[in-house]
Amino acid sequence: PIPAVIVLDPLESSVGLTVEVQGEYWLAGELVSIGLAWADQAQVLIETGQLVPIDQVNADGDGNFVTKITIPSAHEWENGGQAVIVAYSADHQRMFIAGLTLVPPTPTPELPPPSEEGVLPDPMEEATAG
């Protein structure tokens, strides 16, 4: 059989944003768990059964699914780094790991208040004016 796969869109995200997870070649009607882990910890979490699913979805009659997950604000995800989305069957016989780059949320830039004339003074003119 063709191995089960998932495709992520986008491949880069941050806390509070959604990532679409598309699955193909799973068993028809199969319950697929979706987990999120740091790339360097995923294998251990999977092997020890400590990978906590953040979503579960049933594959359709053709073994396909589409779901959207939101990156939670836990496990220091907001600091950014290389994470993985892990999709796996209940018996762990089918599994696929896809890389996801987490970036720190972009702070909203604070614009300086406009000057009264609407034009910022030229520092070169001020330096030569004295």
Image (cartoon, rainbow, N blue to C red):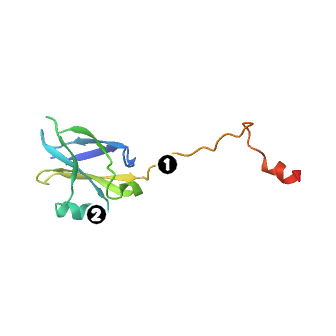
Taking the image as shown, residue 108 lies to the left or right of residue 121, namely left
Indicate which disc residue 21 carries. Answer: none
Image marks 1 and 2: residues in contact by CB distance under 8 Å = no
Which marked residue is nearer to the observer: mark 1 or mark 2?
1
| Residue 52, image x, y percentages | 21, 55
- The residue sitting at the front extreme is 116
Label 1 SS = loop
Query: Is 42 or 3 nearer to us in this picture?
Result: 42
Look at label 1 and name its amino acid.
Pro
Taking the image as shown, residue 34 lies to the left or right of residue 116, namely left
Query: Gap between marks 1 and 2, in whole Å?
Result: 28 Å
Quick check: can you spot residue 84? yes
Q: Earlier in the sequence, mark 1 or mark 2?
A: 2
Give the answer, above or below, for where 127 lies relative to 21: below
| Residue 79, image x, y percentages | 41, 57
Place residue 119 in its image quadrant: top right
Taking the image as shown, residue 128 lies to the left or right of residue 97, namely right
Look at label 2 and name its amino acid.
Gln
For label 2, the crowd category at 10 Å Cα-Cα, with few meaning under 14, some 14 to 19 and many 20 or more, is few
Quick check: can you spot residue 2? no
Question: Which residue corresponds to the image point at 30% horizontal and 44% vertical from the top-left?
Answer: 7
In the picture of the structure, the residue carrying the numbered disc 1 is 107
In the picture of the structure, the residue carrying the numbered disc 2 is 41
Question: Which residue corresponds to the image point at 73% horizontal and 43% vertical from the top-left?
Answer: 120
Label 2 SS = loop
| Residue 54, image x, y percentages | 24, 49
